[in-house]
Amino acid sequence: MKAGEYTLEALLNMNAMRILCQDHNMTLADLDVMASSNALEFVPAVLWAGIKNAAAYHGKDMSQDLSFERFAALLLADPDAITNYAEAISESMGFGGEGEAGGK
């Protein structure tokens, strides 16, 4: 995935959701609320958890020169990014392209 000048690997699976829940002090049941109430926070948060997960999966450390706030700023600077990544997240979580998550 791209965020500004960075090309990053994100691995979205159940461990990424665990990381997301841990980072935001919430349960899996809270994901739907977060997704529907604040997509501008949800999409970068899910992708950041996926980036952290990919690093852990491959036994690598996270880059110290990229913080979540910078990542979110770079990601959200692209007006099409939210829509494109929201659809990819929806599909990776099993909602499909136009299902339940499509109207959120």
Image (cartoon, rainbow, N blue to C red):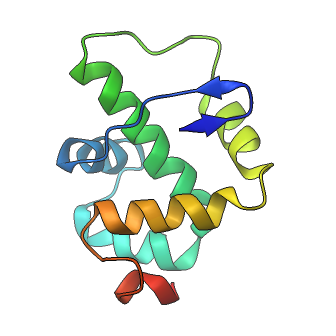
Residue 43 position (above or below residue 67): below
Residue 80 position (above or below residue 67): below
Q: Quadrant of residue 82?
A: bottom right
Q: Which residue is drawn at 30% across and 41% down?
A: 19
Residue 67 position, x and y percent, is 62, 25
Of 47 and 26, nearer the camera is 47
Q: Which residue is drawn at 24% across and 63% down?
A: 28
Q: In this view, does 46 lie to the left or right of 77?
A: left
Residue 48 position (above or below residue 104): above
Residue 44 position, x and y percent, is 56, 49
Question: Looking at the image, can residue 40 be seen?
Answer: no
Residue 37 position, x and y percent, is 55, 78
Question: Looking at the image, can residue 6 be seen?
Answer: yes
Q: How many labels does the image show?
A: 0
Q: Quadrant of residue 89?
A: bottom left
Of 16 and 2, nearer the camera is 2
Q: Residue at x 24, y 46 (%)?
A: 18
Q: Is residue 42 left or right of residue 17?
A: right
Of 28 and 12, nearer the camera is 12
Q: Residue furthest left?
A: 14
Q: Is residue 91 left or right of residue 85?
A: left
